[in-house]
Image (tube, rainbow, N blue to C red):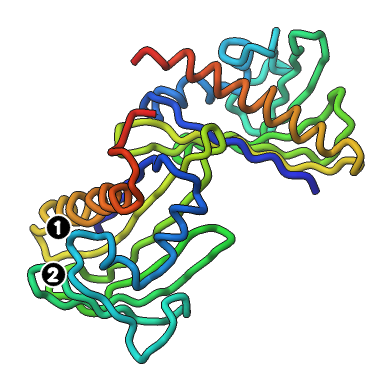
Amino acid sequence: MVKIVKSTIMEAPVEAVWEVLRDFNGHDRWHPAVADSHIERGQSSDKVGCVRRFHLVDGSELREQLLTLSDADMAFTYCLLDTPVPLLNYVAHVRLTPVTDGDLTFWEWESRFDTPAGEEQRLKDMVSEQIYQAGFEAVRAHMGLAPASTA
Amino acid sequence: MARVFVSSVIDAPAAKVWERVRDFNALPRWHPRIRDSRIENGEPSDKIGCVRDFHLQNGDRLREKLLGLSDYDMFCTYTILEGPMPLTNYIATLRLTPVSDGDRTFIEWTAEFDCAPEVEGDLVNGIGINVFQGGFDALKRHFGGR
């Protein structure tokens, strides 16, 4: 079992960051790895249980299901259903918390998954850097925020 | 039920910040509003259930009991047994979480308590600004020069 926890501070109020992140179908508008995305069966992207089918820029197709969405906690949980990358039993959590001192946002992105033997480190590094860390930077750019500072 | 939530970012690794705040008897060493503190009955300050008896700079005396402490999750939960503030059922938690991006610390201090409606605003502001944010400001000054 691989566990990843990545987190950052966004230089924006938590409501503004949540507005971007709560749309489970919105990642193709900001994540550089995602080429296109749609929600299956015409469902709304805030319906718990909905499935997003999307393509990465290399053409591979993935399906992910929304397991939890909370406006009260500003958090959501999702899992991978189909993927060409060997991430097994992948469940991820995203959660925002206000930083009252300065009206900023603490953003955590974490996941657990299994991999084929020997692939743990490569896949951990790939998800950490190319998905999560790149996602932090991409949302900053999407929102017109400065690159990460050291508060 | 009144609620206080204050949070900040300290420019130091979470393990370093935790080292400074985990000792339930260490308030006078890091919080500028606290003058002195001792643990009753000679108990260790990380024994769950221990009581700290301390004074603020203005001379007010409080007694607080340690309800929870986790070195794994880096949090500390406590309740007020005796104090000058007109409130009851006070439970507070100080929690640290690492910020992987930049190796900093997200720090949260929350409290819940019951009080008369006419004093709630003053209590929430007093605790949130003087105690919690005041503590964060002291930690930011201490760790500021990394």
Residue A51 percent location from the top left of the image: 34, 81
Looking at the rendered structure, whether the residues under marks 1 and 2 are on a common chain is answered as yes
Kindly identify which chain the residue marked by label 2 belongs to: A
Residue furthest out toward the bottom? A41
Label 1 belongs to which residue? A123
Q: Quadrant of residue A30?
A: bottom left
Specify the subunit that label 1 lies on: A
Q: At 53% from the left edge and 23% from the top edge, which residue is drawn?
A: B21
Q: Quadrant of residue A37?
A: bottom left
- A137 sits to left or right of B68: left
* Of the pair B49 and A64, the residue shown nearer to us: A64
Classify mark 2: helix, strand or loop: loop
Q: Residue at x 74, y 15 (%)?
A: B54
Q: Position of residue B56 (x, y in %)?
A: 75, 13
Residue that carries the numbered disc 2 in the rendered image: A85
- Element at label 1: helix
| 10 Å crowding of disc 2: few (<14), some (14-19), many (20+) | few
For residue A81, say whether it is visible.
no
Q: Is residue A114 left or right of residue A11?
A: left
The residue at the far front in this view is A144
| Kind of residue sitting beneath label 2 | Val
In the displayed structure, would residue B56 be above or below residue A117? above
Q: Quadrant of the N terminus of chain A?
A: bottom left
Report how many numbered discs are placed on residues in the image.
2
Q: Find out whether the residues at labels 1 and 2 contact each other: C-beta distance under 8 Å.
A: yes
Lower position in the chain sequence, tag 1 or tag 2: 2
